[in-house]
Image (cartoon, rainbow, N blue to C red):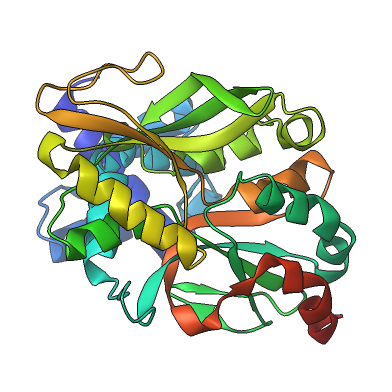
Amino acid sequence: MDEKKKRKELLILNILKDAGMALTSVKIAERLVSLGHEMSERTVRLYLQQMDAEGLTSTNGKRGHHISERGLSEIDSSHIIERMGFLSAKIDRMSYQMNFDLNTTSGSLVINVTFVDPRLFAKNIPYVNKVYADGYAMGQLITFLGPGEALGHLAVPEDKIGVGTVCSITLNGVLLKHGIPTNSRFGGLLELSDKKPVRFVEIIMYDGTSIDPLEIFIRSGMTNYMGAITTGNGRIGASFREFPAESREAVEHIAEKLERVGLGGLVGIGKPGQNLLGIPVSEGRVGAIVIGGLNPVSILEENGVRAYSRALAGLIDFNRLFRYDEMETRIKDYL
């Protein structure tokens, strides 16, 4: 389709979407002019006829036209290219915004949040505990957010709790505070055999998606945490990072300190310029595999529990976190 024609169609669709009601071609033309787009009423009418035929809009008699479900989907699709790189930018922004101090174990860090029925979550705590105990989680800490509590732009629904897990991007933020830049390359599914990482079987590049890769894998039913915690063979979420080769020892040292305060998540780090689990690494860099922050709650979906997870949900104070083995006691406050 001609780009100019496509842009005009999207302008009309967005006006109908914002209106939330049927509009005549006259009204649409007036709103276009108010937005700085010159288009005659006759031109708008011709576009609407074509868009009706394509199923993007539908006529409502003299009251005008309204946008269809297909039209709404067309708007969403058109924004995908605009959002390319959005996730990478968000990773960098939140890494910079967190102010967690590793030496004093104080300040804010990045967490993911999952909205779930507290009663269903309580029944599945043994599985969540096992994910932590087997080392498939980003550290050993977790938190609960009560109904109505806000985190970033999200608010916990009244009939749910928010389960906050430490986001792996916290590692980026800590390293940044120590002067070490991190290149977050991709998120993927890490295959385990006898509890040991074997290879990445699925990957999604961070700069090529607007949604966190692990969110996609969870919704698609591609994970296998039950296998991981029962037989040691499964597929879990993990990500691939790169650091300057000269920082390798410093990264290992910081990772050890994070482990001691319950924030460990570094699965392994490679050697300068060498492949890691078959993933090529640029000259002058070292590759590293970091555990997925959503792993503990991802097992809920495998057990048939409906949950809504959002990675990089917001910042929370370190003091709000508690050890995972306290969940069974703390969940009682929400039952």
Q: Quadrant of the C terminus?
A: bottom right
Number of labels in the image equals 0
Residue 185 relative to residue 16: left or right: left
Residue 31 in the image: x percent, y percent? 24, 62
Residue 250 in the image: x percent, y percent? 21, 50
Residue 245 in the image: x percent, y percent? 14, 34
Residue 166 relative to residue 243: left or right: right
Q: Residue furthest top?
A: 278
Residue 95 drawn above or below residue 152: above
Q: Is residue 67 visible?
A: yes
Residue 161 drawn above or below residue 270: below
* Location of residue 203 by image quarter: top left
Residue 229 relative to residue 246: left or right: right
* Location of residue 29 by image quarter: bottom left
Residue 91 in the image: x percent, y percent? 29, 53
Q: Residue at x 67, y 46 (%)?
A: 298
Q: Residue at x 77, y 29 (%)?
A: 227
The residue lying toward the viewer, choosing from 19 and 314, is 314
Residue 132 relative to residue 244: left or right: right
